Image (cartoon, rainbow, N blue to C red):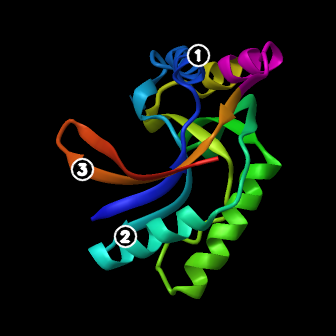
């Protein structure tokens, strides 16, 4: 099964983030992430068999963490200004970085394969297919960041999530959750 490990901000924060992303919809062809699907990916695991899913669930169960706040303080994008790929809200949390490190160590010990991209705490708003107006993009980005009101959300669980790809987009289902 195709899966990943993530934390989910509150739906209220996701709705606010979604509204920020809507300000870009007329200057690009993009796919917006629905608020109910927003999450912070710790590890994309790809296809895993049932045995490894059980091992991953056991690893998450062994995590020792308390509830913590995740702070969002600006909009940014992956890619470059010529070809931006993903519009996101930048997040910060030392507690989440520690959870990522702990899980990384456990996954390595059990030889579970995962995407080893550097960990960058972010909440994806839009996957950009084509940017129509670079200057407008930069202007809106600057305006939002100049007036950005820091957002915080309480995180109290780490989840293993199954991702099923469908023509209408990915459908996510939590298959294991560890609460603080």
Could you tell me which quadrant the N terminus lies in? bottom left
Say whether residue 52 is left or right of residue 104. left
Question: Which secondary structure, mark 1?
Answer: helix
Question: Mark number for residue 163?
Answer: none
When the figure is inspected, residue 53 is found, relative to residue 19, above or below; the finding is: below
In the rendered image, which residue does mark 1 sit on? 16
**Residue at point 29%, 43% (across, down):** 170
Q: What stretch is highlighted in magenta?
A: 140-152
Question: Which secondary structure, mark 3?
Answer: strand
Residue 107 x/y as whole percent: 56, 77
- State the image quarter where residue 166 is shown: top left
When the figure is inspected, residue 156 is found, relative to residue 35, above or below; the finding is: below
When the figure is inspected, residue 104 is found, relative to residue 69, above or below; the finding is: below
Q: Earlier in the sequence, mark 1 or mark 3?
A: 1
In the rendered image, which residue does mark 3 sit on? 165
Query: Is 141 contained in the magenta span?
Result: yes
- State the image quarter where residue 31 is shown: top left
Number of numbered markers:
3
Disc 1 to disc 3, C-alpha distance: 26 Å
Disc 2 to disc 1, C-alpha distance: 33 Å
């Amino acid at each position: 099964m195709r899966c990943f490990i993530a934390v989910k901000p509150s739906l209220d924060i996701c709705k606010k983030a979604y509204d920020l992303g809507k300000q870009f919809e007329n200057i690009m062809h993009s796919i917006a992430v629905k608020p109910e699907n927003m999450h912070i990916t710790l590890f994309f695991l790809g296809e895993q068999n049932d045995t490894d899913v059980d091992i991953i669930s056991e690893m998450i169960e062994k995590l020792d963490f308390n509830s913590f706040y995740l702070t969002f303080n600006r909009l940014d994008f992956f890619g470059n200004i010529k070809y931006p790929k993903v519009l996101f809200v930048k997040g910060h949390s030392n507690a989440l970085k520690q959870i990522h490190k702990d899980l990384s160590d456990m996954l390595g010990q059990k030889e579970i394969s995962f995407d080893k991209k550097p960990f960058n705490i972010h909440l994806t708003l839009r996957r950009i297919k084509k940017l129509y107006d670079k200057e407008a993009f930069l202007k809106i980005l600057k305006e939002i960041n100049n007036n950005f009101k820091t957002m915080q959300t309480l995180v109290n669980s780490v989840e293993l999530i199954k991702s099923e790809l469908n023509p209408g987009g990915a459908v996510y289902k939590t298959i294991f959750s560890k609460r603080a």
